[in-house]
């Protein structure tokens, strides 16, 4: 039976799913280092000792990214398991339902250290809890992303779902940046004196909301009704091998990993750049992120129009290069002859313009590669393509987080901020690397 076109309410429900996991993930990405190793003068204390390894790496720069690296390595296994699933209710949705509640529980536990003062056992706590979080995160996200190809079987379907996914992700990111503001309000209205405790209350509430949003598409979308049928009987290693033999996919994956490594550096330091380099109150970070989302919402509908007239390859290379210039601007934060808040707004506007393109098109590129492979081989292993994309993506993010935390060793406080500025340089170089790599991608013209 031919699958039905996904109606608009269910497309929106699909977007709620990415909003949920984006909210949860970005709380971890932005606040984990900030709360365990805070800058001076923010009413918080160090929860982990700054132990150095080889006089370069602090111990937290090695422990925290380990969870993302674990996540990256298990993604191909989850992808293969999903592709070969014989579950009568579908290959993707049942896994999403299983993963949601445990992921929320581990997300909350991540911010519940056993000791509220500087203690090495808090590092052990992060190291253990994050493995549970990232396992269930992958168990939800790999099937979720794969649905984009299978639900978007009709004309312009993949672009619609990718646009919805991009907007949902950015809204989740923005919602996560309001955590500091929620924390202040909790302190005021609930008379919570300790700021760490108030942060924990805010994080609990946000993760419950994230879980409810993640459950929505898993409950309202009937996979058998709306997804094109398909199956794969390739064993894990054979599926992995044939996926990596695709030269075009390898080029895409390298560029994508470089991009996400650069973005991880900038995202991890966002709260620092705003409060330390620009001297803006942390409660205002949510307002700044809201500006970026407004820009993305305005630009996203135009991406589909651009994609019909300009090759995806050209749009992606241009956006990588432009984003590199934006990231380089962080090095000069607080030193430009314009007000600090104006500098922050300019960053958000420019970042939003190019992120709208890079949040939509690369996902459709993976879907196109997977669809072409299915036509060539007869094996429906979309999950493996999205799983391997996630592997390279998360490996890049892991390295990016490590670079950020390593560079904080060279300064993360007002008046001693070289490490934060160097993150802008690192992000710029990585985006230029992504642009250079993507010039070798073989893209088909898609303009009329």
Image (cartoon, grey):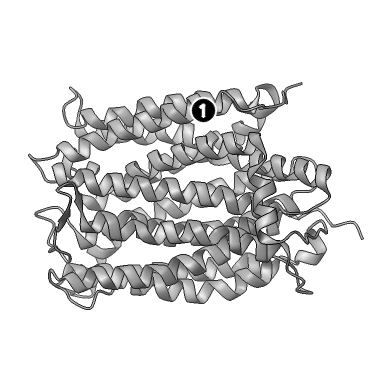
Answer left or right for 112 relative to 149: left
Residue 115 falls in which quadrant of the image? bottom left
Residue drawn at the location 36% of the way across and 55% of the way down: 29
Nearest the viewer among 448 and 369 is 369
Q: Secondary structure at mark 1?
A: helix
Residue 363 falls in which quadrant of the image? top right
x and y percent of residue 280 in the render?
19, 43
x and y percent of residue 416 in the render?
9, 40
**Visible residue check, residue 277:** yes
Answer left or right for 5 relative to 337: right
Nearest the viewer among 368 and 277 is 368
On the image, numbered disc 1 is attached to which residue? 437
x and y percent of residue 82 in the render?
68, 64
Nearest the viewer among 118 and 70 is 70
Answer left or right for 295 relative to 115: right
Residue drawn at the location 56% of the way across and 66% of the way down: 139
Residue drawn at the location 17% of the way across and 70% of the way down: 120
**Visible residue check, residue 147:** no
Answer left or right for 350 relative to 358: left
The quadrant of the image that shows the N terminus is bottom right
Nearest the viewer among 352 and 102 is 102
């Amino acid at each position: 039976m031919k699958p039905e076109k996904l109606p608009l309410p269910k497309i929106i429900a699909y977007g709620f799913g990415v909003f949920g996991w984006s909210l949860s993930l970005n709380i971890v990405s932005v606040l984990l280092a900030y709360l365990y190793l805070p800058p001076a003068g923010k009413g918080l204390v160090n929860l982990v000792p700054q132990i150095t390894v080889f006089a370069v790496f602090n111990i937290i720069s090695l422990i925290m990214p380990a969870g993302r690296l674990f996540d990256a390595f298990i993604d191909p296994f989850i992808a293969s398991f999903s592709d070969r699933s014989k579950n009568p209710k579908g290959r993707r949705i049942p896994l999403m339902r299983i993963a949601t509640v445990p992921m929320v529980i581990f997300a909350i536990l991540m911010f519940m250290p056993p000791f509220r003062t500087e203690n090495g056992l808090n590092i052990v706590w992060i190291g253990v809890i994050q493995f549970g979080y990232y396992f269930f995160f992958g168990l939800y996200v790999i099937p979720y992303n794969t649905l984009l190809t299978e639900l978007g079987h009709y004309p312009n379907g993949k672009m619609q779902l990718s646009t919805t996914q991009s907007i949902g992700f950015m809204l989740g990111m923005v919602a996560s940046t309001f955590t500091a503001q929620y924390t202040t309000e909790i302190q005021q209205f609930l008379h919570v004196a300790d700021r760490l405790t108030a942060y924990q209350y805010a994080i609990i509430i946000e993760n419950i909301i994230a879980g409810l949003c993640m459950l929505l598409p898993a409950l309202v979308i009937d996979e058998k009704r709306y997804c094109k049928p398909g199956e794969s009987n390739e064993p894990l290693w054979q599926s992995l091998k044939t996926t990596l033999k695709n030269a075009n996919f390898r080029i895409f994956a390298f560029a994508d990993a470089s991009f996400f490594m650069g973005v991880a550096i900038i995202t991890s330091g966002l709260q620092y750049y705003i409060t330390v380099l620009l001297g803006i109150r942390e409660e205002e970070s949510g307002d700044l992120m809201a500006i970026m989302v407004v820009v993305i919402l305005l630009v996203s509908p135009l991406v589909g129009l651009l994609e019909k007239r300009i090759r995806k390859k050209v749009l992606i290379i241009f956006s990588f290069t432009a984003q590199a210039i934006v990231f380089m601007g962080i090095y000069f934060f607080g030193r430009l002859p314009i007000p600090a808040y104006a500098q922050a707004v300019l960053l958000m506007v420019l970042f939003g313009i190019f992120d709208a393109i890079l949040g939509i098109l690369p996902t459709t590129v993976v879907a196109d590669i997977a669809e072409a492979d299915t036509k060539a081989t007869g094996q429906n292993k979309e999950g493996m393509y999205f799983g391997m994309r996630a592997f390279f993506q998360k490996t890049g993010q892991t390295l990016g987080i490590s670079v950020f935390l390593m560079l904080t060793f060279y300064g993360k406080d007002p008046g001693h901020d070289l490490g934060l500025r160097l993150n802008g340089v690192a992000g710029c170089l990585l985006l230029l690397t992504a642009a250079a790599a993507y010039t070798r991608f073989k893209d088909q013209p898609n303009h009329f």
